[in-house]
Structures are given as C-alpha cells and as structure tokens.
Image (spheres, rainbow, N blue to C red):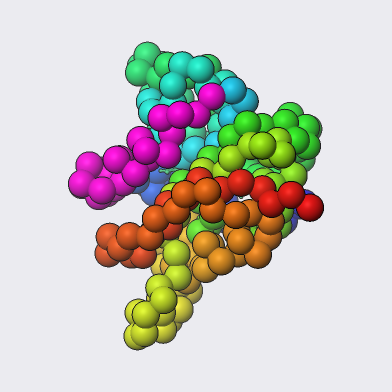
Amino acid sequence: MNHKRQFNHDSLYSRLFARIYNPVMRSTELAHLLKKRKALLSEVRGKVLEIGVGTGANLPLYPAEAELLAIEPSSSMLKYARKLLESGSVRAKVQLMQAGIEDAQVAEATPDGGYDFIVSTLVLCTVPNQEAAIRQIRAWLKPEGRLLVLEHIQDGRQPHRWIQRAITPVWKHLGEGCHLDRPTDKLLKENGFRAVQEQYFTQWLPFYWAILEPVRR
Ligand SMILES: C[S@@+](CC[C@H](N)C(=O)[O-])C[C@H]1O[C@@H](n2cnc3c(N)ncnc32)[C@H](O)[C@@H]1O
C-alpha cells in the first residue's frame, strides 16, 4: 500500500495546526471524548499499534501492560507526543515512529497477524485511502485481536449529510486532510470487521465508538 501524501506535514500550516490542536480540542476532550477514550483503552494489553497518534491524547490512558508502536506522519504533531513521553505521565512502553499507515517502514516493523490491538481515534477521517487502510489494519491484527475506534462519521440525517459533503472540500484543507463525510462505520463492516461493542453519539458531529473483531474468512 503506497499512496501519495496529500499534505506536507512539515509545512508552516502543519506546525500551526499541531500547536493549536490541544487548546482547540480541550473543552470537547474534557466534556466528552476523554471518557470515551478511557472506556476504549483501559483493558488494552500486549502488542498494540496506534495509527496517527497525533499529539498523544491517548498515551497517558494505556495501561502499563501495553507495548505500543505509535505511528504519526507529522513531525509537528509528534513533537508534542514526544514531550508527553518525556514528562513521565505515560505508563505503557511506547515506541514513536514518524510514518503514515501506508509507509513501507511501518509494514517492515509490522508482521501480518502481529497485533493484539490496533487503535484509531480521529484518524480514519484523514488517511488518504480509507478502505486500503482498513484492510491493512485487518491484516496486521491477530485473528483474536481487536480494533478500537473513536471516529467522527457521516451524518445519517438530511440536510446535515448534504452540508457535510458541501463543506468537506474546504474543511479538508483546514483540517489537514480530515473528511467530514466518511461512512467509516459502514466501511469497517464492509471490509472485514464486526462490532463486539459499539456506540453512536453526537457531539456537534456524529461519532462512532467501537470495539471490533476481524471476521473470520
Ligand atoms: C485529528 S488528528 C487525531 C490525533 C489523535 N489520534 C487523537 O485522537 O487526538 C489526525 C491525525 O492523523 C494523522 N494522519 C494523517 N494521515 C495519516 C496517515 N496516512 N497515517 C497515519 N496517521 C495519519 C495526522 O497527522 C493527525 O495527527
């Protein structure tokens, strides 16, 4: 899997995006997302891959029993994740790698069937080729492994869905590749996953929270 990057993750705008990311997200995180993240990550053990770790919002929530490879293409976002690791507030064993899910270096470090858990929070809205990423995640999971997701998704209601589609071309540029209108929940199920637990909730945007297992072929 090798897709051309849509964004220069080291541009001036990317550095600004990384700098404002935590302050902009803070109130939504404290009011809503943090408890969803905790519910997703509290039982994680063993070999874990987190895609698009960003500034590291999940890192302090992993138990000490997790051994984590955390990948992130933006050096600007990684800088904040690295600072968090250095602050001593992370219990898990973490290796950070500057890479996107489609990059060869991730595949080289990641044998098929190698992970107990793969984590994606607010990332499948952004990866360049979502279906290819989901298929790759499935290949990297152990047969009994779990995919943990917290993602905003396409709105089922009208005119919300129409508005999402209309503003996504501009939003994508402001949000470093983020699409408002991806039906991530449906695509996960069409590409080899079944929900073990799932929740839908709306917090300005509609969100999908789920623990998913790979469907046996
Ligand atoms: C909205 S941020 C979410 C960060 C973090 N996961 C969180 O929950 O706060 C989306 C992240 O996905 C990363 N990303 C973009 N393209 C990616 C790719 N191809 N593979 C992995 N991560 C990617 C971005 O650089 C960014 O840090």
Residue under the image location 51 percent in, 68 percent down: 182
Residue 15, given in percent of the width and then of the height, sits at 43, 44
Up-down relation of residue 163 to residue 17 (above or below): below
Residue under the image location 45 percent in, 78 percent down: 165
Residue 49, given in percent of the width and then of the height, sits at 60, 34
Is residue 137 in sight in this rendering? Answer: yes
Q: Quadrant of residue 39?
A: top left
Left or right of residue 23: residue 61: right
Is residue 20 in sight in this rendering? Answer: no
Main SS type for the magenta part? Answer: helix
Magenta segment boundaries in residue numbering? 23-45
Up-down relation of residue 196 to residue 113 (above or below): below
Q: Quadrant of residue 97?
A: top right
Residue under the image location 49 percent in, 33 percent down: 78
Left or right of residue 217: residue 94: left
Residue 101, given in percent of the width and then of the height, sits at 65, 45
Residue placed farthest to the top in the image?
88
Comparing 31 with 127, the one in front is 31
Q: Is residue 27 magenta?
A: yes
Q: Is residue 101 magenta?
A: no
Residue 42, given in percent of the width and then of the height, sits at 41, 30
Comparing 78 with 117, the one in front is 117
Comparing 132 with 179, the one in front is 132
Residue under the image location 45 percent in, 29 percent down: 43
Left or right of residue 213: residue 14: left
- How many marks the image carries: the answer is 0
